[in-house]
Amino acid sequence: MTASAILRPRGPADRLTGLFWRRPGLLLLLLITPPLLWLGVVYLGSLAALLLQSFYSIDEFSGVVKEEFTLKTYAELFRPQNLDIILRTVVMAAAVTLTCAILAFPIAYYAARYAKGPWKAAFYLGVMLPLWSSYLVKVYAWKLILAKEGILGWAAEGTGTGFIITGILSIPGLEGSSLSTSPFGTFLVFVYIWLPYMILPMQAALERVPTTMLEASADLGATRSQTFRTVILPLALPGVIAGSIFTFSLTLGDYIIPQIVGDSARFIGLAVYQLQGTAGNIPLAAAFAVVPILIMLIYLTLAKRAGAFDAL
Amino acid sequence: MRSEASLGLKVAAIGGLLFLHLPILLIFLYAFTTEERTYEFPPPGLTTQWFGVAWNREDIWPPLYLSLKVAAISTALAMILGTLVAAAMARARFFGRDQISLLILLPIALPGVITGMSLRSAFGIMDIPFSTWTIVLGHATFCIVIVYNNAVARMRRLSGGIMEASADLGANSFQTFRYVLLPNLGSALLAGGMLAFALSFDEVIVTTFTAGQQSTLPIWMLNELVRPRQRPVTNVVAIVVFAATFFPILIAYYLTRGGSETAGMGK
């Protein structure tokens, strides 16, 4: 009996397998080339196009894009009304991030420390479903809630707490005829929509805080607030920073929320959208889009240094 | 250390969850209201007529088809590219690995308006006319990371031993892929695909820059929000969009339950 009775004849697939075995780098190259081509050409290529366009300028009389390199468009960014847009967006992003961190903490802490079994699953799904469910539907729901004749107004009338809403609407900078046309409404919707992005990494970080440390802290006579300040918070910080990357970045670029809820004050995203669309000023739109990229690059560098990437 | 949560913490945690869920439920109620023009609460009366009206509105169907088409193509592309890159990144250590993982993450770490405006600039420079494919370019790019996340987590959990065993038993790479790797990856890939579909179906920010005159369902909805025609019809469509994203997410959760892969991080 010959060996060929046991071993199958070797086909091209077997020969390729042998080649991959001898040259593992070749297989790696074959696997990684298509996705790298896609991301490299489509995504990085587009980013390069954006940068290129931001160095073009627009002819003020004809409105035609002049394809010559100039810093004129970037100089336009520093006009007071444009600086105002950038400042407003950054302040909003910071306020939203801070509020999300405060609201997320009890949910994340409870889910990480006390929720067991089915409650754990309920908490996880309870955060995951709003995170993933339709963004527009959620924004729309808040339009219904915040409108003058909407559910909040109705509840305030029923409980006699309407003065709180009126009070908020009379604060300088937050004026509006109802919550849905006030910057406070914009802020509220931002917080609601991005809150799950803060809860999840925070919960992941809190789950890694060993219970023994909390016991040790209590044994050494620390009060609850001391334990919180000196043990829990520093250990949870990478998770908070990881969450803040999302809340901050998403607020920087969003333009749907300020368009639907609020006093139609302009944010960076809205400026980009309007400049490239109705105004047809692509160079300035591109220059505006570079601002969040720069802010996020600085933010990501700082976050990396704080060890937040391991918590992502 | 107390093993019971304090009452304050409990109330804050449950209150937070309710805060996340109640607004969504409201949409369902408003789809049945008899009041057409305002957002009056409580609704003066309830009716199911808006479902029929929405069904007969001819301007809803083309955006729905386009959304389904774009989501299907983007998901298919993202599943191929995401799985390939996950296979490369799961075990191998090579030069530039960190840069590649950053590159995959970048389309969702940077605001959507950047992706949108970048693509818009590229189309402008290269004179590419708007089509279904210009929308797909953007969607597939940010869907890759979703599939990648799910696939790479599952690959890391797989023991390398089964691949070696397969080779020892005489299987070639393709047979190992077909009979060992694919069945083990199946549910993770399906979960990634479901999430990518939901994400693409719902996407509006990138789409507004890459769609031109075309209208996907979220863009139709956005137009109705800014310039309403029949408000309750918008609510009916909102329920459809909600269902089209809700069920894939639920299925994805059950497919990856118990694993280390977090299905949703980083939308």
Image (cartoon, coloured by chain):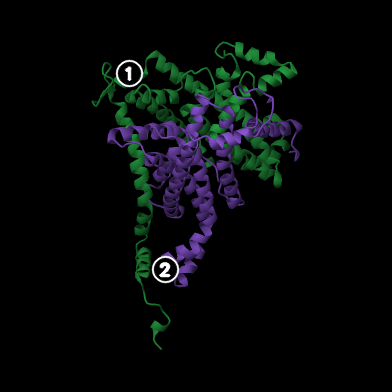
Which residue occupies the foreground of this view, A180 or A244?
A180
Q: Which chain is green?
A: A
Q: Classify mark 2: helix, strand or loop.
A: loop
- Seen in the picture, residue B221 relative to A185 is either above or below; the reply is below
On the same chain, marks 1 and 2? The answer is no
- Quarter placement of the N terminus of chain A: bottom left
- Which residue matches tag 2? B172
Image coordinates of residue A22 in percent, x first then y, are: 35, 65
Q: Residue at x 38, y 66 (%)?
A: A17
Query: Among all residues in the image, which is located at the extreme bottom?
Result: A1
- Which residue matches tag 1? A75
Characterize the local packing of mark 1: few (<14), some (14-19) or many (20 or more) Cα atoms within 10 angstroms: few
Residue B69 in which image quadrant:
top left
Which residue occupies the foreground of this view, A41 or A227?
A41
Q: In the image, what residue type sits under mark 2?
A: Asn
Q: Are marks 1 and 2 in contact (CB under 8 Å)?
A: no
- Seen in the picture, residue B61 relative to B30 is either above or below; the reply is below
What subunit carries mark 2? B
Q: Is residue A231 visible?
A: no
Q: In the image, what residue type sits under mark 1?
A: Ala
Residue A230 in which image quadrant:
top right
Q: Residue at x 32, y 35 (%)?
A: B123
Q: Classify mark 1: helix, strand or loop.
A: helix
Q: Is residue A129 visible?
A: yes
Left or right? Give the position of A34 relative to A173.
Answer: left
Image coordinates of residue B196 in percent, x first then y, are: 49, 45
Q: CA distance from mark 1 to mark 2?
A: 61 Å
Image coordinates of residue A139 in percent, x first then y, are: 56, 29
Q: Chain B colour?
A: purple
